Amino acid sequence: MTACAIEDGTAAAVEAGETVEPGSEGPEGAAEPPDPATDAADPQEPPVPPVPAVPPVPVELPAAPARGPAETVLPTAPPAFTITANGAYAARLTAARGRAHETGGAGTGSDTDSDSDTDTAWYPERWTLDGPEPYAVPLPLNQPEEADSQVLPLADGRVLIRRRVADRHALSLLYPTGPGTGELPLGAVECAELTLLPPSPDGVSAYALAAGAHSTGLWLVAGGTSGPERIAELPGRCSGGVWLDRAGRLLALDREPAGGGPVKAVAVDLGRGAEMTPLLQIAPDSDDRLLLADPDSGLLLIRSDAPGHDRLGWGVLGSCLPVRFPECLRLPDAAVTPFAVQPGQMLMPESCAVALRIDGAAGSWVGVWRPSGRRLHQLPVPEGWLAGSGVWSREGVLGLPYANGETACAVAFLAAPADEEPAMGRAPAGYPESGMQPSGAVAPPSVCRPVPLGQAPLVGRTAPR
């Protein structure tokens, strides 16, 4: 289960052994927050030809601090808002200020200055998102939390918290008990660094990585039988963490070899003793990271420097087609990061709507993109959006959680914009191709055996002679 990159290429050319020249590398789009009616189009990349849908390949493998809505702020680290895999609950570390303090980037979800930590009392907060209206429950204990603590919601409404205590990391489950907060200590892990992985799809388990100099410990820190349990020692330094299935068995990690070298995404099968297999092998010396995966359709969102510099790309797990790097996902002076994929699109990866966080000089806003639409819609966000967080419904409605001076807990709903069908005719004689023409001859779908994408040739990366 590997992947190979092709930039602005076509499946037909790959199968025929032809070399496909890459599209223009000129950046497109605007880094300023968009007008709701304005979109950034993608005229440079040819549309994807119809391809047979391929299913994912199975791998064997002190008291509660007083707070008001206007006093809620975001920590600088760890990630501000984490949502369960089923979208029912979320958790974050928030704080009530001891005195008024200006925050930067109002309405963009920007982090606060680190010097404000001495004036804050951090505590966990759980959000319920699957009811008629969202609501937040504070979970403070007898003393404030440190700003570097990490929280993770579980599907039963409890919140896992990781705290650094000297040279170890203590783990506990927090839950509301009437007017107070209950705490169930789980144990501790002795290591220099311990990072909680994204919520498991099973809703009851929680995993963490303890990276060392030459290997990385994979820990089951919640959902086990007797406290934190190290289930594997993985070679190299591992980071990231993306779930590939709905059962919570297949986990993708970004692995750097112990002696140094390119970062490659690998798949870890927790059902087979944490057996590790390659997942992305785009080029021998490229850094290939997996950012998001949709278990229903098999859509993968990838960041790689195989095209010569870091680019966002997409592919399909088990597909015959190589990874593509759309030009419309490149914005000048802005960082683009995917954070949510529309679920429920079985066998239709190209129709999945992808939500992207766009960070520019003016703040943060949202982009919506579909592989088949080849267009990045840039949209404004509610004031106080918890940047980089959101959840899709199966019908293509994106919920964006936010908190500001008007409300301490709310979700704004945004319907994914429709993509207009591009004209498929050829350009008139004497005029350059617009980049929206078909990228290959239309052919009837053929039945093919899903092969590792790493076996497809990497084309379009050499300078023309």
Image (tube, rainbow, N blue to C red):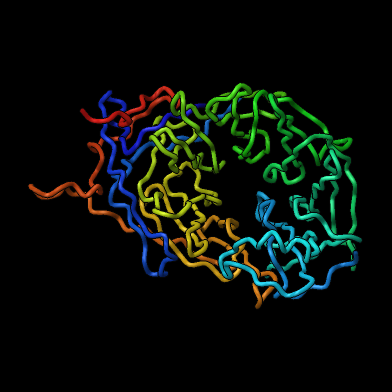
Q: Where is residue 177 shown, x and y percent of the image?
A: 89, 62
Q: Nearer the viewer, residue 60 or 180?
A: 180
The residue at the point 72 percent across, 64 percent down is 116
Residue at the bottom extreme, as displayed: 406
Q: Nearer the viewer, residue 16 or 166?
A: 166
Q: How many marks?
A: 0
Q: Where is residue 51 shown, x and y percent of the image?
A: 36, 37
Q: Where is residue 357 shown, x and y percent of the image?
A: 52, 55
Q: Nearer the viewer, residue 171 or 250?
A: 171
Q: In this rendering, does residue 388 appear at all?
A: yes
Residue 392 drawn above or below residue 212: below
Residue at the front extreme, as displayed: 115
In the picture, measured across the screen, residue 295 lies left or right of residue 223, that is left
Q: In this rendering, does residue 451 appear at all?
A: no
The residue at the point 80 percent across, 54 percent down is 146
Screen quadrant of the C terminus: top left
The residue at the point 42 percent across, 32 percent down is 306
In the picture, measured across the screen, residue 333 lies left or right of residue 163, that is left
In the picture, measured across the screen, residue 191 lies left or right of residue 60, that is right
Res 15 quadrant in image: top left
The residue at the point 63 percent across, 41 percent down is 246
Q: Where is residue 34 shown, x and y percent of the image?
A: 42, 66
